[in-house]
Amino acid sequence: MSVVDWELRWQMGQTGWDIGQPSPPLCRYADQIPPEKRHLRLLIPGCGNAYEASYLLSQGFSNITVVDIAPTAIQRLEQRLDAEHPSWRTRLRPRCIDFFQLDETFDFILEQTFFCALPPVLRPRYAQHMHHLLSSGGTLAGVLFDRDFEGGPPFGGHADEYRALFEPLFHIRTLDPCYNSIPPRAGTEVFVILKKNAS
């Protein structure tokens, strides 16, 4: 889908992927990051409403970048953050940009419904670009679907496919069934924690 397609979905309210709250698995993962590391560079790609970013701000994270290709998504996020976290601009940077055009370095990247929005043909490029964006020893963590869909987006997949995709570039610390999915997705997700391999 193009920038225009995603922007149109946002303008028309066609955001069925939006769960209306921070993702519980990502919140629990963030909770385990020690306070002394919450200043490190953290990215949320395909952020949408970025409820996770609001949660991270409330938990003391201070170097957050969120990225979305749709201008309306970024505008609405900024408006909500103005109301919820008046000082957010010193700790969070929103960018309206194509993920694949991003050229920075991050210590943590959180994945939540971005991977499944990309056509499967782009998954090798996704893995390569995530590897490129992460600092040495950096971590990509998040939730991936473990089921099939008709058509897409979202596009489904399964744990064996993900293992084959990520193993050449990452040390797979975790690729397991997600135990704390939201109820509508229970039993259909895996949680991944991937550490960047040396280049």
Image (spheres, helix red, strand yellow):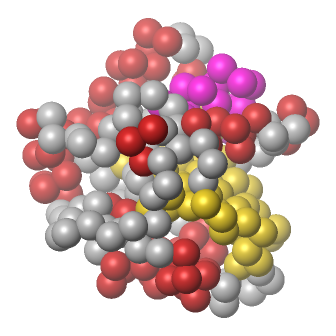
What percent of the width, then of the height, locates residue 169? 67, 84
Going 9% across and 36% down the picture, which residue do you hit?
12
- Percent position (x, y) of residue 189? 50, 58
Q: Residue drawn at (60%, 26%), measured in percent from left and top? A: 55
Left/right placement of residue 63 relative to residue 114 reads: right
Could you tell whether 88 is left or right of 135 in the image?
A: left
- Asked if residue 52 lies in the magenta stretch, the reply is yes
Main SS of residues in magenta:
helix
Q: Is residue 9 left or right of residue 171?
A: left
- Residue 96 sits above or below residue 18 on the image: below
The quarter of the image holding the C terminus is bottom right
How many marks can you see? 0
- Compared to 152, does 171 lie above or below? below
Point out the image quarter for the N terminus.
Answer: bottom left
Does residue 194 sit above or below 70 in this rendering? below
Query: Residue at image x 73%, y 56%?
Result: 107
Nearest the viewer among 180 and 106 is 180
Image: magenta residue range: 51-63
Residue 38 is drawn in which quadrant?
top right
Q: Position of residue 27 (x, y in %)?
A: 64, 36
Viewer can see residue 67: no
Question: Which residue is at a point 76% across and 77% down the rendered structure image?
Answer: 171
What x and y, as percent, mark residue 146?
46, 66
Residue 146 visible? The answer is yes
Please state which of residues 108 and 152 is positioned toward the viewer in this rendering: 152
Is 76 a magenta residue? no
From this viewpoint, which residue is outermost toward the front? 187
